[in-house]
Image (cartoon, coloured by chain):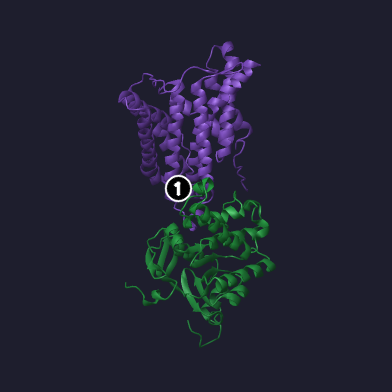
Amino acid sequence: MTTFLQLILSGIMVGAIYSLVAIGVVLIFKSTGIFNIAQGAILMLGAYILFAFLVQLAWPLWIALIITFLLAIAAGYLIERFALRPLIGQSFLAAFMVTLAMIGLLEGLVTLVWGTFGRRYPEFIPTDPIRLGPLVLSQEYTWSFFIAAGLIVAFYFFFKYHRLGLAMRAVAEDHQAAQSTGISIKTAFSLSWVIGAVIATAGGILLATSAGVTISLGTVGLKALPVVLLGGLESIPGAIVGGLIIGIVEKVAGGYLDPMVGGGVEEVVPFVLMVIILLVKPYGLFGQVRIERI
Amino acid sequence: MQQPETTRKSTLAVDNIFLSFGGIQALKGVSLEVGEKEIVAIIGPNGAGKTSLLNSINGFYRPQKGRIFFNGLEVTNLSSHRRAQLGLARTFQNIELYTGMTTLDNLMAARHIHMKYNFLWGALYFGKAHDEEIRHRRVVEDIIDFLEMEAIRKKVVGALPYGKRKLVELGRALALEPKLLLLDEPMAGMNTEEKEDMARFILDIYEEKGIPVVLIEHDMGVVMDIADKVVVLDFGEKIADGSSKEVKSNPRVIKAYLGEEEPAQTGTKV
């Protein structure tokens, strides 16, 4: 029983980060109609940029963080402005291929600059675990969880109450209506990419504190894929729930099955789940069901 | 071409616009003027270019030639959201609403352009932001009263019946506090009672709020009743422009609506 609770708890902790990353994907898909498969690559880049400032240049943590996030904002803006805006009005596939190409580009860039060795951040989160009765939690996970949850809550308030959040919700629902009430679609598009990149960077840094700064962070970021498919492509609450479910399933399955098959279950299970979801509920738990009239 | 002198007085002046999609000429040299106090109806057979004209006025389409002035300001090259910010509001033939949001939220979303402070800060402390939110809420609640939508203010609009959704769309356009209202078939698909309500609302908007209106409408009875001026389009050309009486007796209009046969009438002006 303790093992089970322990696994669920770690699942929730890591799931919160998946939720965060998936929100970025959903946000971009909702407002621009582009499925950004490169979210994981942007996440990895973010983690490496912090590494460069924090370790290679040895700058203080808070300055390194500020600069990393400023660069993330710039990256999000530039990607939208130069890679995707020219494709407005083109087919879904064209924009999707650009994001696919971006994965190769960003991975190549990272390999070129930092090589393929895994790196680590210096420990800026205390390592001694927190004990909750019989349950043990690493501080890294706990911090990550609360930071991810805090960011999710912050975005919730942004969308509900901020002028630009309101504009973005309007654009996500109906482009024509939004334009006719004085909302600039282009601004909303840039903003969703900027937020998407910032979210990815935050997720990357949180994941890297425990998993290390490696190229394979991009693969971890790819777990946003089963998360958004489970939750539904258009649903931000779906991304949150989906992230937690994927996190829990992965940890529980890993915990019980790993000893039997010799490891690696955690990597596979989310994608197995994704295939099952696509078969059973192609629009996800909270997605918009498209009715096709014939 | 110099600016027509009439743009000084009129709310909207469309000057000789040409719009084509590939080989199809949607608008061929259409001009139109809307005064400060006017309800103008655009009529014409299907495919005459009515919606294209409206889309050109609000900036969804960019005519290849011609100019458009709004309150004396040239808006020909402005994007549609800029035009909306200047006070050009519109509704759509096929309702375009934020279907997942409530009536209230749909209207509040249109207040976006008038917001200076953020509600975010309003939620955290009382101050200017809080006052501003109250002000926006008041404007929106007034519109809800005005259009008699109290019963549906908290309902998600996707679930509302057609006639109500049309009304919410009109409410959203009003929430912009527009200086000109463009309505694309506001009464299409409504029953007689709903049509009467809508006609009354349009007249009220015009009389109480003093907002000039341009509307596309197929119901000739409604058009004759409420429009000060009627513009008739056919195959992308303006074939008549005048009071409803003048237009009704115009032989080109009769021909466009009823077919080839030349009525044996004389003395009508084109």
Image vertical order of residue A92 relative to residue B98, above or below: above
| Quarter of the image where the N terminus of chain B is located | bottom left
Image vertical order of residue B40 relative to residue A21, above or below: below
Q: Residue furthest bottom?
A: B267
Q: How many marks?
A: 1
Residue B64, percent from left and from top: 38, 63
| Left or right of A130, for residue A208 | left
Residue at (61%, 69%) from the top-left corner? B201
| Left or right of B237, for residue A130 | right
Image vertical order of residue B73 relative to residue A138, above or below: below
Image vertical order of residue A258 relative to residue B168, above or below: above
In the structure shown, which secondary structural element does the residue marked by tag 1 occupy?
helix
Residue A148, percent from left and from top: 50, 31
Residue at (51%, 78%) from the top-left corner? B252
Q: Residue furthest front?
A: B126
Q: Which amino acid does the dot numbered 1 rest on?
A: Ala
Q: Foreground: B139 or A21?
A: B139
| Residue B96 appears in the rendering | no
- Residue under circle 1? A188
| Residue A115 falls in image quadrant | top left
Tint of chain B: green
| Residue A16 falls in image quadrant | top right
Chain shown purple: that is A
Residue B142, percent from left and from top: 59, 63
